[in-house]
Amino acid sequence: MFGWRKRIGYIAPTVIEVLAYEFYRFAPEGVGLVGVTCGIDDWRPEEFEKGLAQVRSFAAYLGSRGVDYIIHGGGPLVVARGKGYEEEIVREITQASGKPATTGVRSAMEAMRAAGSKRVAIASPYPPGHNKAMADYLASFGFEIVAAEGANVPFKDLQKPTPHEVYAFASAVATRARDADTLYLPCPQWQGAQIVERLEEDTGKAVISYTHANFFCAFRQLEIGAKIVGHGKLLGSLARA
């Protein structure tokens, strides 16, 4: 039966496609994804504001649907508001839904701390401005950003780069960022989670994908300690926990 174990709510800024595909590749049996989308259309600030304006109502709706936990997606929307906004939006979601929650940036930082990350290289699909905003946000919390490179993928094409193409880009970033101990792949809308284990094996670095970080935090909060094999060290650590 769908979601007999736990149901995780997800508030997406745009369509839910790659994220759902990747989630069900590693999710333990009985853990279901319950998603809603804010329907933003591009990288413009006014679109970000449109998405954020819907968060409270969608959080309340997901709470009414009986989810156990809520994830807010969309790192660029959060970092655009400045340091600390991840805590504000988590409070808003929790108050509206009555459920524990996280947001993508907060999950990324928690995952990096769990991995012992100090020096981070970012390989993103973002345009330059949003890539820099993400780098600056992480740096403001004490992470040393060794490199931050964005592929500048058009908003409605984020799902198009193949895992092989994402691997090639991220691997090149890791090669240039030799001093980094961690490679961070933000954005759930491009196919980064599928290549995490291969990147870890080939680069020798910890690799944190946006999708893995979100559900790592959700599974840990919900005490889902399943054995997850083939998806990298972060999700693999849940079994040990």
Image: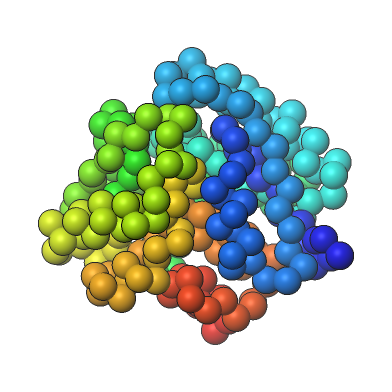
Residue 85 pos. (x, y %): 49, 35
* In the displayed structure image, the side of residue 69 where residue 80 appears, left or right: left
- Asked which colour scheme the image uses, the reply is rainbow
Visible in this render: residue 145?
A: no
Question: In this view of the protein, which residue sits in the foreground, 235 or 95?
Answer: 235
Left/right of residue 151 with respect to residue 62 in the rendered view: left
Q: Quadrant of the C terminus?
A: bottom right
| Residue drawn at 25 percent across, 52 percent down | 169
Residue 93: image x %, image y %?
68, 39
What residue is at 31 percent from the left and 76 percent from the top? 201
What's the residue at 74%, 28% (across, down)?
A: 57
- In the picture, which quadrant includes the N terminus? bottom right
From the top left corner, tell me how far across and down residue 168 is, in percent. 26, 56
Image quadrant in which you'd find residue 222 = bottom right
Q: Residue furthest bottom?
A: 240
Asked whether residue 94 is in view, the answer is yes
How far from the left and from the top, in percent, is residue 221? Answer: 65, 64
Residue 68 lies in quadrant: bottom right
Number of numbered discs visible in the structure rendering:
0
- What residue is shown at x 63% (from left), y 61% (from top)? 24
- Residue 135, compared with residue 164, is above or below; it is above
